[in-house]
Amino acid sequence: MKMSQGKNERITFKLNGKQYEVEARKNETHDELVARAALKRKEIEDGAMTVNQGTQFGAYAKKYLETYKRNDVGEAMYALYESNLRNHILPYIGHLKIKDIKPINCKEIINARAGHSKSHISKIVQLLNQVFEAAMDDDIIIKNPARNLQLPAKAKDGTGRAITDHEREYSLKVAETHKAGVWVKTMLYTGMRPGETAALQFRHIDFKARTITVEQARESKTDNIAGPKSMAGKRVLPIREILLPDLFSHCEGKNGDPWGYVFTQETTGNRHTKTSMYHLWCSFKRELNIAMGCRVYRSQLIPPFPVAEDLIAYCFRHTFASDMAAAGVPVAAMKMLMGHEDVSTTMRYTHKTDELFENARGLLDKFSRPGKQMGKNEEGKFNMFIQN
């Protein structure tokens, strides 16, 4: 085997007159690359899967997921990849040889999903592109037939959106007294996913550094705690000045156990499940409706409801992204703080990360609307805490 080092380390080897190349993945060590190259050579020698012009798309796509996604994404995300492949792609082109697939075959797949959300269809397009790009790397094809796919005109926008200024005003007002208040503010001011807040433990919060480390999340299908959706989901977030007083007060006196959960069910003290967090959100949304003028009769809300039906907890994450854009946070820093898998080249340079992180914190604090400030007693407690 021959090694090539530099920006993108790779290993090449010849077998049966054909040259193969294995390139290092993001964050992969040299030893891991060597081991993966050796495994690929053994698979080819053992005939685990012969990759050539006659390879069928179905067999290759399944092998692609196992090789490139199994250890790189969380279980929930991997299950989504498998579901999209099995239910929406393989019925159309699974039986075809990769070299015989044309753009029209790929467009047929996308047209069949017309009427579904843009997010759903985009994930299918992304998977098609990833598989075909890998096939190009394996010299099976020279062009990617899914490269220029356009979403159907009938694709829906979905429910993901930022909150309006009116919704923000009343959400923050209700958050001052509602049991879900600090949870809502944490999503709004950090961009954390609801499932990530469910898995947040006291050990993840560093008040001295004013940071939150995201390294796990609640899985939506099983309610188990596992890694985030992707490697990019593991990230460090700044605790902004506007969030600091509330988060510190919420955690004060409760963080004796570093492995304890920050947000728990009020009645049991256990960490939140998908169901309990949904009920928490419904409770908050009910109070939001009342605060915005909804009438109440015998504890029942009387239509019309002032709060839009599509306002969900996830909207606070979208709002965080919108706030970063409005504050002038660089795109590279936005992708880092949102934990998106598609990170720009800038993010690969570790000496830039701290600079982007602190710049993002400063811009966000400068952009923050007037909020709750620490009183003298709170400030004294906090200063004593970080000095110890």
Image (tube, rainbow, N blue to C red):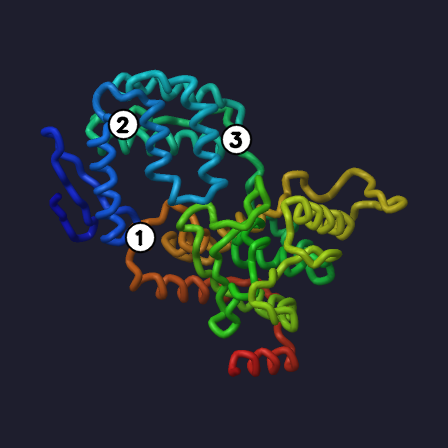
Q: Residue furthest right?
A: 298
Residue behind mark 2: 49
Task: Inspect the image, locate mark 2, and give the three-letter code of the amino acid beneath it.
Answer: Met
* Residue 250 image-quadrant placement: bottom right
Task: Give, as a three-letter code, the residue at label 1.
Answer: Asn
| Observer-nearest of 213 and 298 | 213
Q: Can you give x and y, in whole percent of width and height, for residue 148 in the image?
A: 33, 27
Q: Residue at x 40, y 54 (%)?
A: 336
Task: Give the secondary structure at mark 1.
Answer: loop
The quadrant of the picture occupied by the N terminus is: top left
Farthest front residue in view: 46
Question: Callout 2: helix, strand or loop?
Answer: loop
Q: Is residue 316 left or right of residue 357?
A: right
Give x and y (percent) for residue 386.
Answer: 52, 79
Between 163 and 209, the residue placed more toward the observer is 209
Q: Is residue 58 above or below residue 316?
A: above
Q: Amino acid at mark 3?
A: Ser
| Upstream in sequence: badge 3 or badge 2 | 2
Whole-angstrom CA distance, mark 3 to mark 1, is: 32 Å
Q: Which residue is mark 1?
A: 27
Could you tell me which residue is drawn at 55 percent across and 41 percent down?
160
Image quadrant of residue 74? Answer: top left
Are the residues flagged by discs 3 and 1 in contact, CB closer than 8 Å? no
Q: Earlier in the sequence, mark 1 or mark 2?
A: 1
Residue 296 location in percent, x, y?
85, 46
Camera sees residue 319: no
How far, Cα to Cα, is label 3 from label 2? 35 Å
Q: Which residue is mark 3?
A: 117
Q: Residues within 10 Å of mark 3 (few under 14, many from 20)?
A: some
